[in-house]
Amino acid sequence: MTARNSSLRAAFTQIELLVVIAIIGALIGLLLPAVQKVRAAAALTQCRNNLKQIALAAANYESAHQCLPPGLNVSRNSRDPNSQFNFPPPWAGPYTGCLAYLLPYIEQDAAYQQLYSFDPGLFKLSSTSPAWAYGYGPWDFKDPSVPPSQWNGTGKGYPKAANTLIKSYLCPADPGTRAGAVIDGITLNTTDPVAYGVYFDWVYNAPGYGAELGRSNYLGVGGAFGVVQPGNPYPGDAAWVPYTGIYYDNSQTKVTDITDGTSFTLAFGEYLGAIHNNGSREFELSWMGAGWCLTKFGLKPIYGPEKNDYTNAMFQSKHTSGIVNFAFADGSVHGISTGVAFKVYIYLSGMHDGQVVNPADY
């Protein structure tokens, strides 16, 4: 008589499978917020490290040059061969931003040398060099592949080192929303005959003319309204005279000029070019033209139909903690709540207003 081993094949019933799937789904639901929290914390830390590197690079620049870099180079002598698409002198260019001056101090000397070899005048305040994104043809209106609706006088011959991707100039919390235009220079005009206000020099986000430009999420802090010049015809602007910041057009700020103290004065902050509540984005920012931004519009979003949206002249972040990171002039980095008292924010942004703010206030 032969004995046989018999075995039964185990299997899940449909109900058991559904229970297992439900348990896995519940675990994922519990884990997902934790993972997102870790990612948000990592992005916040990386952003602060970026700002610290930038602030320390500025300090090293100051040691080498006896002043901090200009917020934006706007030479009175700049001449643009393509002037029909640009401001006339003395606002014609070259629009080199402070982050470009810091390249040798953040281990990006190769990019700096390429830019300097292309045109040394890009880094000289009194140069005749044109706007870096406009002055070197051939121009987009001579390119049959560019539709007239996107003509902006942009030059395809711009220095290609400006396309360099620099991770320390990028905040990982930026959602990556694309904008139709890329800023190549932010300037504040307070001189006649051009109207007073903030001006964005920009190029279309088009292949060959702006799409490839290296981006940035950081700008220098220019105080409430930059430097309010004598003769400014708007009486309200006089209120901002005491609150000049470290970085503004053609600034050459020395550490000794920061009489409020480097530990109490904002130097660099986060910027997104206005990502609105509906998800749209007005601008992206190139590091080559990453100059400076003012603070008179506050950090709290108070614009738009519901008074809860941003303008393109505000520092802004997408950190889930509801703060905007800033580097102070001493190299320290702090997150400032968007709900900070307006006067505290203004006092922090001015470098010699005589108002020293306790860190507990922000």
Image: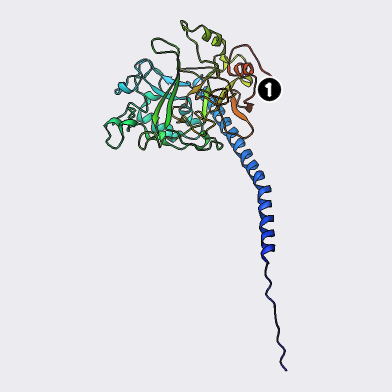
Q: Which residue is at 45% across, 28% downward?
A: 100
Q: So how many labels did they put on this image?
A: 1
Q: Which residue is at 46% across, 5% downward?
A: 231
Compared across the picture, whether 192 is left or right of 34 comes to: left
Residue 321 in view, yes or no: yes
Residue 324 in which image quadrant: top right
Query: Where residue 52 sits: x, y (%)?
Result: 58, 30
Mark 1: which secondary structure?
helix
Residue 7 in which image quadrant: bottom right
Which residue is most to the bottom?
1
**Quadrant (top left/top right/bottom left/bottom right) for the C terminus:** top right
Using the image as rendered, state which of residue 266 and residue 235 is in the foreground: 235
Using the image as rendered, state which of residue 259 and residue 5 is in the foreground: 5
**Quadrant (top left/top right/bottom left/bottom right) for the N terminus:** bottom right
Query: Where residue 172 sits: x, y (%)?
Result: 55, 38
Q: Colour scheme used in the picture?
A: rainbow
Amino acid at circle 1: Pro
**Residue corresponding to mark 1:** 359
Query: Where residue 232 sits: x, y (%)?
Result: 47, 7
Residue 139 in view, yes or no: no
Using the image as rendered, state which of residue 339 and residue 294 is in the foreground: 339
* Residue neighbourhood size for the residue with mark 1, other residues' Cα within 10 Å, grouped as few (<14), some (14–19), many (≥20): few
Compared across the picture, whether 360 is left or right of 77 comes to: right
Query: Where residue 84 sits: x, y (%)?
Result: 30, 21
